[in-house]
Image (tube, helix red, strand yellow):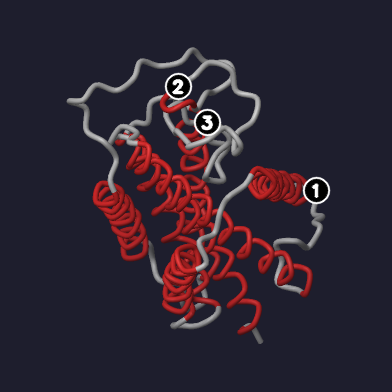
Amino acid sequence: MQSNNPVFRRSEEFNRSGAAAYQGFGEPQYGGYTQPGYPAPEAPTTRQGRMTIDSVVQSTAITLAVVFVAAAATWFLTPAIEGADVAEDLAPLYAASAIGGILAFVLSLVNSFKREISPALVLAFAAAEGVALGAISKTFDAFIGDTIVLQAVLGTMAAFAGTLAAYKVFDIKVGNKFRTFVVAAMFGMVALGFLEIILGLFSADLGLFGFGPLGLLFAVAGLVLGVFMLVMDFDFVEQGVRNGIPERESWRASFAMTVSLVWIYTNLLRILAILQQD
C-alpha cells in the first residue's frame, strides 16, 4: 500500500473499505483490501488485539516522549555556544545532528519497508531523531533567539490540533490523487535535499534550504506538505480502527505521525529563523 506517512511506507495490513481508494489490487486481504506483490496474510484471530484510538494515542505519546527526552539530553549535554570559541562549540552540535540525522533516516527506511512493524525500531528512530532535533534546535536558539524553539514547538502543536480539527469538522476524504500528489512531493523534496548536499560539497547550492526568499518559499511549501502528510496519517488511523487491523499497527501510526510532526517542526523552525534574522 502507498503510505500514509512520508517515508515511503508499505503496510500489508492496512484495510480500507471499498476498492475505489486503492485500485488494481489482486488477492483479497481483510475486508477486500489487497497489496500487489505480497501473498494475502491470514485473517487475524479473534484473540488478537485490534488497533484503537487509545492504542494509537498511547504509542504516539511514548514515541514523542522518547524524541523529547533524547532532544533534551542532547541540548543539556552539549556545550553552550558563546564567547570566542563558537566554531569549537558548534562541532559537537554538528556531529550530533549529522549522526542522529543519518541514523534516523536509515531507521525510517527500515521502519517504512518492514512488513511487520517493530516497536523497538520505532523507538530507536525516535531516539535518533531526538538527538538530531536537540542539536539543530540548540543551534537555532543560539543564533536566532531564546524563544524561537518554543515558538516552533507551539506552532507544531497548533498545526497538529488545527489539522485534526479540520479533518473531523470538514470530513476530509483521502483519495488516490491526493495521496499520489503528497508522495510525489515528498520524493521531490527528499531528492532536492540530496542534490543540495551534493552541491554543497563543491561549494555550490540551489538556495532552497538557505535563509533567503527562495529558502522561505521552500520552507512554506514543506510546512504545507507536512500538514498534508498529517491528513494521510489521520486517514490511516481512522480506516485502520474501522477495519480492525492488529493493535501493533498503532506503532506504525505513531511512527508516521512522528515523521510528519518532525517535518512540520523543522520547516517551521526555518521559517521563523528567516523571518527573525537580522
Q: Nearer the viewer, mark 2 or mark 1?
A: 2
Instruction: Decide: is 201 above or below 94.
Output: above
Task: Please tell me the numbered disc located at residue 10.
Answer: 3
**195 to the left or right of 255:** right
User: Looking at the image, which residue is at 59% across and 39% down?
Assistant: 21
Q: Which residue is mark 2?
A: 29
CB contact under 8 Å: marks 2 and 3: no
Secondary structure state at the residue bearing disc 1: loop
Give the spatial CA distance, label 2 vs label 3. Answer: 14 Å
Say whether disc 2 or disc 3 marks the residue closer to the N-terminus.
Answer: 3
User: In the rendered structure, which amino acid carries the disc numbered 1?
Assistant: Phe
Circle 1: is it few (<14), some (14-19), or many (20+) Cα within 10 Å? Answer: few
User: In the rendered structure, which amino acid carries the disc numbered 2?
Assistant: Gln
Q: Which residue is mark 1?
A: 202
Task: Measuring from the top left, give residue 30's x and y in whole percent.
Answer: 41, 25
**226 to the left or right of 198:** left
User: Looking at the image, which residue is at 55% across and 31% down?
Assistant: 1
Q: Nearer the viewer, mark 2 or mark 3?
A: 2
Secondary structure state at the residue bearing disc 3: loop
User: Looking at the image, which residue is at 25% across and 46% down?
Assistant: 55
Find the residue positioned furthest to the bottom: 278
Task: Measuring from the top left, give residue 261's x and y in whole percent.
Answer: 47, 59
Give the spatial CA distance, label 2 vs label 1. Answer: 50 Å
